Image: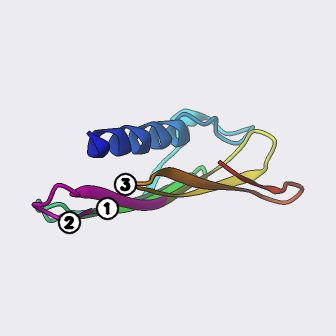
């Protein structure tokens, strides 16, 4: 059950980063994939990363901990960033594991730092 909750949190965080508006003046249909990497060993570990021409970036890696025990849990670390319509870049760095989803949000110039 814990694994399901953690994966749901990670999925929501990933979806949130993909739904951001592109910088003003750019056409979302003109965004290109600059980099896409993925690696999944099929045994509980994976990593992936992508970068788009609008400045959006995402990197994540996960691994299954305590395999075969009652404490088996997925541990995920990652980050995503985007540039908001006002030109400010936001970076969310997170860890999702048996202790829950723990993000740190950083705001570019003119902004502070907030913890989730």
Pointer 2: residues within 10 angstroms few (<14), some, or many (20+)? few
Residue at x 41%, y 45% (from the top left corner):
10
Q: Position of residue 103 (x, y in %)?
A: 58, 53
- Pointer 1 residue: 62
Residue 29 visible:
yes
Which of pointers 3 and 1 lies earlier in the amino acid sequence? 1
Residue furthest right in the image: 110
What element does badge 3 sit on? loop
Residue 29 is marked as none
- Pointer 2 residue: 66
- Is residue 116 or residue 57 the one in the foreground? 116
- Pointer 3 residue: 98
Is residue 11 toward the left or the right of residue 2 in the image? right
Residue at x 31%, y 63% (from the top left corner):
47
Range covered by the magenta-colored residues: 64-78
Q: Position of residue 75 (x, y in %)?
A: 34, 60
Residue 37 visible:
no
Q: Quadrant of residue 93?
A: bottom right
């Amino acid at each position: 059950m814990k694994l399901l909750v953690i994966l749901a949190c990670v999925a929501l965080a990933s979806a949130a980063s993909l739904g951001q508006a592109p910088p003003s003046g750019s056409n979302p249909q003109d965004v290109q994939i600059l980099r896409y990497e993925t690696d999944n060993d099929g045994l509980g570990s994976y990593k992936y990363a992508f970068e788009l021409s609008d400045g959006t970036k995402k990197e994540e890696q996960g691994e299954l901990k305590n395999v075969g025990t009652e404490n088996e849990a997925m541990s995920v670390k990652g980050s995503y960033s985007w540039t908001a319509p006002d030109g400010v870049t936001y970076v969310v760095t997170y860890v999702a594991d048996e202790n829950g989803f723990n993000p740190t949000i950083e705001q570019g110039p003119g902004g502070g730092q907030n913890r989730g």
